[in-house]
């Protein structure tokens, strides 16, 4: 029975999160991308922060009343992962087979997807908003379950482990707090919905991102110096400032180009049709937000203090591989879109990800 319940746990979680997304009132906001058929700017229902808070309250009530143990998601994590993998595969097949081919190979279509912007009931539910929402909320619940296990089963509590839990909690909260800003990011502009995005959000995102916690939740305090833990926390904060600052500066420039951001007067290059930021966060490198994401991942992996457990480093290594390939794809898309302006921009902003290095 435990195995079966563990397998269906992500399905139940996704159903509850989807229900909350549907019933919690919210206003619709305009995004950046347009409908391929009508040319109209797409509108989205954004209520992720409220769904996250209510989901955490439900998790707490279920644990407090002993209906579902606080540690359930951690203790059944492997079965939950298997269940999430099945859900991710089924959804990916469904969303790909529903639309006509866009590439010569089915496997390429399956991996990258066919539909860019799938919405249901006139935008009541958007596939990308939903995918990132259910992935973020289940990730947060997994993090809370890991923290509960550490606090209730380990004699020597590891402050660094709890710091890693806090970092991932902030990661989930701040994404959904700034949910609208992400409508202007690569994922919503360029990605199609297939295995990469569907499986990624339904299985990979909520389970793999917490990999450092999986392998250290049952371990005691390793005794690393307090100053080292503080430095790791500062590294995470610095990475967050780069990522959120860059995304917010771009969002402000796209929606109100005449306004400053953090006192930075926007400077741009233009060909009369398109404009590209060349100062502030975006003056250092063309994808400085990716650098911030990688730094945050390194901090999360390092925080528990078990540097010799190689599994904890899978998360930042994945980000390095992801962002280097994504950056290459994004460069091709931008070169095709902006033409000669992109050449002038890359001559001005020379570095791809790491200012002064790469």
Image (cartoon, helix red, strand yellow):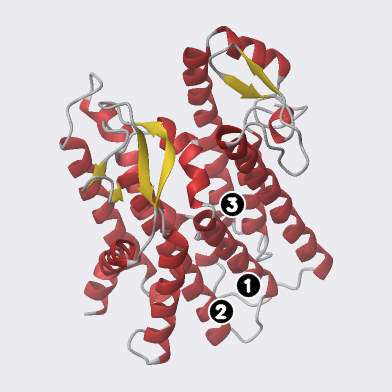
> Would you say the residues marked 1 and 2 are in contact, meaning their CB atoms lie under 8 Å apart?
yes
Tag 2 residue = 150
Name the mark on residue 200: none
From the image, which quarter does the N terminus lie in?
Answer: bottom left
- The residues bearing labels 3 and 2 have C-alpha atoms spaced at a distance of 20 Å
- The residues bearing labels 1 and 3 have C-alpha atoms spaced at a distance of 17 Å
Which label sits in the foreground, 1 or 3? 1
Mark 2 residue element: helix
Q: Which of marks 3 and 2 is nearer the N terminus?
A: 2
Label 1, residues with CA under 10 Å away: few <14, some 14-19, many ≥20 = many
- Of the pair 122 and 95, the residue shown nearer to us: 122
Tell me if residue 123 can be seen: yes
The picture places residue 301, in percent across and down from the top left corner, at 62, 57
- Of the pair 245 and 171, the residue shown nearer to us: 245
Label 2, residues with CA under 10 Å away: few <14, some 14-19, many ≥20 = many
From the image, which quarter does the C terminus lie in?
Answer: top right
Which label sits in the foreground, 1 or 2? 1
Q: Write the residue at 22% across / 41% down.
A: 95
Q: Write the residue at 48% across / 24% down.
A: 329
> Would you say the residues marked 1 and 3 are in contact, meaning their CB atoms lie under 8 Å apart?
no
Tag 1 residue = 162
Which quadrant of the figure has residue 65?
A: bottom left
Mark 1 residue element: helix
The picture places residue 109, in percent across and down from the top left corner, at 26, 29
Name the mark on residue 313: 3
Which quadrant of the figure has residue 236?
A: bottom right
- The residues bearing labels 1 and 2 have C-alpha atoms spaced at a distance of 8 Å
Mark 3 residue element: helix
The image shows residue 178, relative to residue 280, as above or below, that is below
The picture places residue 322, in percent across and down from the top left corner, at 51, 37
The picture places residue 75, in percent across and down from the top left corner, at 40, 76
């Amino acid at each position: 029975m435990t195995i079966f319940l563990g397998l269906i746990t992500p399905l139940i979680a996704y159903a509850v999160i989807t229900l909350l997304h549907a019933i919690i009132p919210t206003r619709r906001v305009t995004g950046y991308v347009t409908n391929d058929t009508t040319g109209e700017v797409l509108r989205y229902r954004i209520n992720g922060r409220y769904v996250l808070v209510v989901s955490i309250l439900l998790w707490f009530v279920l644990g407090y009343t002993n209906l579902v143990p606080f540690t359930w998601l951690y203790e059944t994590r492997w079965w939950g992962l298997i269940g999430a993998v099945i859900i991710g595969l089924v959804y990916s097949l469904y969303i790909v087979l529903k639309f006509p081919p866009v590439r010569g190979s089915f496997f390429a279509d399956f991996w990258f997807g066919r539909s860019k912007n799938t919405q249901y009931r006139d935008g009541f539910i958007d596939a990308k908003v939903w995918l990132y929402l259910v992935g973020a909320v289940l990730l947060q619940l997994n993090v809370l379950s890991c923290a509960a296990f550490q606090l209730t089963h380990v004699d020597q509590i590891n402050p660094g482990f709890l710091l890693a839990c806090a970092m991932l909690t902030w990661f989930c909260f701040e994404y959904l707090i700034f949910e609208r800003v992400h409508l202007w990011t690569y994922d919503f502009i360029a990605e199609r919905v297939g295995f990469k995005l569907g499986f990624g959000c339904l299985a990979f995102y909520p389970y793999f991102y917490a990999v450092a916690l999986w392998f250290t939740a049952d371990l005691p305090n390793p005794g690393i110096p307090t100053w080292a833990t503080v430095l790791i926390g500062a590294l995470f904060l610095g990475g967050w400032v780069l990522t959120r600052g860059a995304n917010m500066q771009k969002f402000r420039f796209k929606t109100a180009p005449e306004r400053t951001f953090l006192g930075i007067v926007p400077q741009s290059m233009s060909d009369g049709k398109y404009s590209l930021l060349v100062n502030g966060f975006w003056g250092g490198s063309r994808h400085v937000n990716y650098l911030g994401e990688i730094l945050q991942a390194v901090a999360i992996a390092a925080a528990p203090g078990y540097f010799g457990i190689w599994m904890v480093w899978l998360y930042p290594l994945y980000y390095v591989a992801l962002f280097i390939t994504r950056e290459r794809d994004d460069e091709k898309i931008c070169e095709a879109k902006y033409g000669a302006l992109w050449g002038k921009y890359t001559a001005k902003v020379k570095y791809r990800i790491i200012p002064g290095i790469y």
